[in-house]
Amino acid sequence: MPTLRLALCQVNPSVGDIDGNAGRVRAWARRAADAGAQLALFPELMLTGYPVEDLVFRRSFVAASKAALDRLAADLAADGLGELPVVVGYLDADGPPQVSGEAEPGRGARNAAALLHRGEVVARYFKHHLPNYGVFDEDRYFVPGEMLTVVRLGGVDVVLTICEDLWQAGGPFAAARQVGVGLVVNINGSPYELNKDDVRLPLVRRRAAEAGATIAYVNMIGGQDELVFEGDSMIVAADGTLLTRAPQFVEHLLVQDVELPEAAGSGDDGTPGGAELADGLRVVRRTVDGLPPAPTGPAAAGGIIEPVADEAEVWQALVLGLRDYVDKNRFPSVVLGLSGGIDSAVVAAIAVDALGADRVVGVSLPSQHSSEHSREDAADLAKRTGLDYRIEPIQPMVDTFLANMSLAGVAVENLQARVRGVILMALSNQEGHLVLTTGNKSELAVGYSTLYGDSVGGFNPIKDVWKTLVWRLAKWRNAEAARLGGTPPIPENSIGKPPSAELSPGQLDSDTLPDYDVLDPILIGYIDGDLGREGLVASGHTPAVVDKVLRMVDTAEYKRRQSAPGTKISMKAFGRDRRLPITNRWREHG
């Protein structure tokens, strides 16, 4: 049986940076060639970054992507890499955008893959299955491909596929079995969700069985606005054996020698469309003549990296999501309010891990209601992490407002939060920091925040993290620091004390909210699981508590619509995933 040395390039592209992304392909193709690779694979829409959203509708952007692909093929050859076949994702179009009055049926923008060899684009493939759920809107942007691209290289027939083609049965993988290929390449921009890695391997195994072929699955890493991509690239043999698996959340070159069945029959048919059909797809065959020579010496084995525990996985996702949001948007540093509580402590620790202590400013903003232990806990966290710590008392500014306005009750509580927001934004304007807001998903769900106060900021690292998970993350991070011989970054008092906004004397979250151990399961069922009142009560929740919680969630939609973006880690994050009308009279009645 022929053996191919595959190089899966798990890299971090940036949306819109076409030249930079092409340079990344050249650099990693060099690394693949130096490792003796005979086929190098890059992620979905590698040249443009993913997702490009409404940039698809700009014809100048599409033209730039297509031109960059041709230029990349030539540049790889000029780099001395022309003999190495390279598969790369890019944005193509064979007609006007579907939103245009000039749109043609079956033509338009394409989520595409190309195989580059000897300075030319040898083969192209257009994504067949287009996801239109959760964070995906690909039916809005792309036209599905109706061809199966089969490339013969090194005596092996290889099929090109893209991301969602793997997640749905039928189509390219069923067609691959009908035409008898040995390898299916699947390039991905598959966003992270907690436990998605547990789903991915069984899925790849099912598709390997469906295709009767080895699957080479390569996924990007990196943050893009709310999304974060974790990699987890792998190769699975036709019989379901996991041959190699990459680590999560880091760039990585995964190199593996794979034995594959020799192709039978003819190769390149030389036709643009192909007369052969497989599972309703037109089969287009191409042949790559000449590959880098088979490497000598020991066989390449990429190894198998086992997935990490849930808390470690989420922490890495949050760190990477924040780092890339800050760096790709060219913010020099971040600033956040340090209350001494668990949420701001966790956000500060994430920020220090992501950016380094020298790029994080933590500000204590005490009022007359701020407890001494909260002030001490904020200072303790700053000492543990080494961030730039400042103290800006808010009471004189609050008193000035109250001397000129007649306010009482909740209005005074909210005034304190808004004064804090004004101070953080002033520091942002003066010194160039990105303001991080620190509200968790539980608080956002029930509207437990002050608009233009504690909700102020440009990014929220824990926006998609339930309160109970915030505590778990804090305990994990401290335990991990102790395991590695470092200083636990989060004060134990911040973890152990009852949560409070400290906007009035003796205030606790439990004054107006159920305990988070009660609240979070209701919110998870209602928001993530789309359960109605009856379903929640049938699950064992107290009817009166369910009614209270659902009322709070339903009336807080206008606040969530104005909240900062934050890294998505769950199956249904606020924003991209969960889209409800603000003006909405539907209620789950008790």
Image: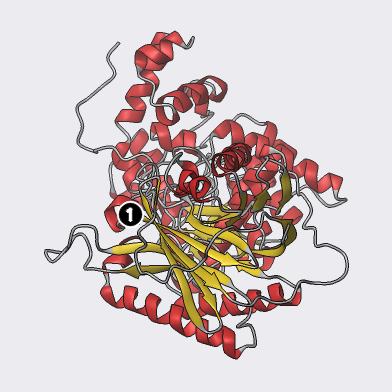
x, y percent for residue 546: 40, 16
Q: Quadrant of the C terminus?
A: top left
Q: Residue at x 43, y 54 (%)?
A: 421
Extreme residue toward the left, this view = 101
Element class at badge 1: loop
Circle 1 crowding by C-alpha within 10 Å: few under 14, some 14–19, many from 20: many
Q: How many marks overall? A: 1
Extreme residue toward the front, this view = 265
Q: Quadrant of the N terminus?
A: bottom right
Give the colour scheme of this rendering: secondary structure
> Residue 577's quadrant in the figure?
top left
Front residue of this view, candidates 233 and 296: 296
- Is 175 on the left-hand or right-hand side of 306? left
Extreme residue toward the bottom, this view = 78
Q: Amino acid at mark 1?
A: Pro
- Is 107 on the left-hand or right-hand side of 311? left
Front residue of this view, candidates 356 and 248: 248
x, y percent for residue 274: 37, 62
Residue ID for mark 1: 144
Q: Residue at x 36, y 29 (%)?
A: 553
Front residue of this view, candidates 139 and 250: 139
Query: Does residue 283 sit above or below 333 in this rendering?
Result: above
> Could one spot residue 487 in this view of the protein?
yes
x, y percent for residue 376: 69, 46
> Could one spot residue 220 in this view of the protein?
no
- Is 580 on the left-hand or right-hand side of 124? left
x, y percent for residue 190: 51, 51
